[in-house]
Structure formats: structure tokens, C-alpha cells
Image (cartoon, grey):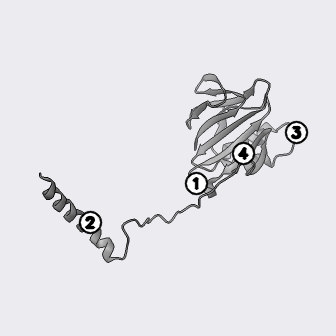
């Protein structure tokens, strides 16, 4: 097919596709999605801080910010603090180490993550993490879809001191997370 014939036939097809929308008053670039979210910029010092059983989390983005697509928080954690092996049934997680060292186990494989390292923990796969070394660690954690932030808010309301593992387990189970 020569170029002129292609342009004429393509233009005809495009015109027939657009005419119904133009007649109904729609524009070519109109987005019909009504679930808009507002852009958001969060500085390093901003966010909602929660103490989740020793895991100091600064929540940067939550489901209400992202149309429930993703939640993201920063963990600022002392050496020795960690989360035992567990399984998420609802969300995948990404861990990105900014500072310090994090021992991460995913699917039975354990590795030490250092500054700049990233790990992916898919739902339904056991994983755990623990801060190792001598310095405090900073890690950005993302979970998608959003929703897990509601569990963290419940856990942060537990009394100070050693956690009541039975209560922790019950809250986590309600949100689709089991310990293994």
C-alpha cells in the first residue's frame, strides 16, 4: 500500500472512531476515570510516625493517597529489631535499604541487604527481616495494593513493653498475615 492511500484509509478509520465521541461532546484526551488522586510530595521529615512493636515507621503514602494502589513507609530501626517469618495473603512488598544492613529472608533464602539493595517479597511467600550490624537502619518499604497500613495503626495502639504475641497474631490474621 502506498503512503497516500494509507493516510487516507487510516484517517477515515480514525474519523469514524472519533465522530461518536465528538457528537456527544467528548474531547479526544478526556479521561473517563473518576477515581482521581491528587499529586503529593512528602519531604523526608514528613509523614505519620508509628511505633509498630519497635519498628519505627514513617508512613509517607497510604491507600487514601493512592486510590488504594500502594502504601509506602520508611522504617527507622535499631539493630536487633526485626519481623519474624510471616506470609502476606493480600499484598506484595518491596524493601529498599537506604542505610545500615538488613538480613532478609524470602522463600527460605537469606541475604544481607546493604545501602542501595532492593528485595521483592511476593504475597504467599514466607519472608522475614532483621536489622544486623551495629548501626540503625533506614529502609523504604512499599506494599501493594494498599491496606496493610490499617494493621500497622492497630498494632501501634498496643501498650508499650513486650508485645502480647497472641494479640499481635490476632490483629495480623485479621489483615491476612500469618506467622510461620
| Residue assigned mark 3 | 161
**In the rendered image, which residue does mark 1 sit on?**
68
Query: Could you say which is closer to the camera, residue 77 or residue 179?
Result: 77
Residue at the spot of label 2? 17
Q: Quadrant of the C terminus?
A: top right
Callout 2 secondary element: helix
Which one is in front in this view, the residue at disc 4 or the one at disc 1?
1
Ranked by sequence position, the earlier of labels 2 and 1 is: 2
Q: Position of residue 56 (x, y in %)?
A: 77, 41
Picture quadrant where residue 31 is located: bottom left
Identified at 59% across, 49% down, the residue is: 70
Q: Choose top left, top right, bottom left or bottom right for residue 51.
A: top right
Query: Element type at marker 3?
Result: loop
Give the mark nearest the N terminus, 4 or 3. 3
Q: Of the residues under marks 4 and 1, which one precedes in the sequence?
A: 1
Q: Is residue 48 above or below residue 33?
A: above
Q: For the residues marked 1 and 3, what is the alpha-carbon distance in whole angstroms? A: 32 Å
| Distance (Cα) linking label 2 and label 1 | 33 Å
Determine which residue is flagged by label 4: 171
Report, in whole angstroms, how far the alpha carbon at label 4 lies from the one at label 3: 17 Å
Amino acid at each position: 500500500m502506498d503512503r497516500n492511500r494509507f493516510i487516507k484509509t487510516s484517517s477515515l478509520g480514525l474519523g469514524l472512531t472519533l465522530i461518536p465521541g465528538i457528537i456527544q461532546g467528548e474531547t479526544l484526551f478526556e479521561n473517563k476515570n473518576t477515581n482521581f488522586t491528587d499529586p503529593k510530595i512528602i519531604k523526608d521529615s514528613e509523614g505519620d510516625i508509628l511505633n509498630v512493636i519497635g519498628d519505627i515507621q514513617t508512613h509517607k503514602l497510604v491507600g487514601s493517597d493512592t486510590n488504594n494502589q500502594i502504601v509506602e513507609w520508611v522504617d527507622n530501626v535499631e539493630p536487633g529489631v526485626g519481623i519474624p517469618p510471616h506470609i502476606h495473603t493480600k499484598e506484595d512488598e518491596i524493601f529498599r535499604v537506604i542505610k545500615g544492613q538488613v538480613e532478609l529472608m524470602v522463600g527460605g533464602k537469606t541475604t544481607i541487604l546493604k545501602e542501595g539493595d532492593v528485595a521483592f517479597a511476593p504475597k504467599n511467600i514466607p519472608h522475614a527481616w532483621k536489622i544486623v550490624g551495629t548501626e540503625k537502619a533506614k529502609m523504604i518499604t512499599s506494599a501493594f495494593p494498599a491496606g496493610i497500613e490499617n494493621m500497622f495503626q492497630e498494632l501501634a495502639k498496643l501498650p508499650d513493653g513486650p508485645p502480647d504475641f497472641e494479640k499481635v497474631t490476632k490483629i495480623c490474621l485479621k489483615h491476612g498475615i500469618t506467622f510461620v
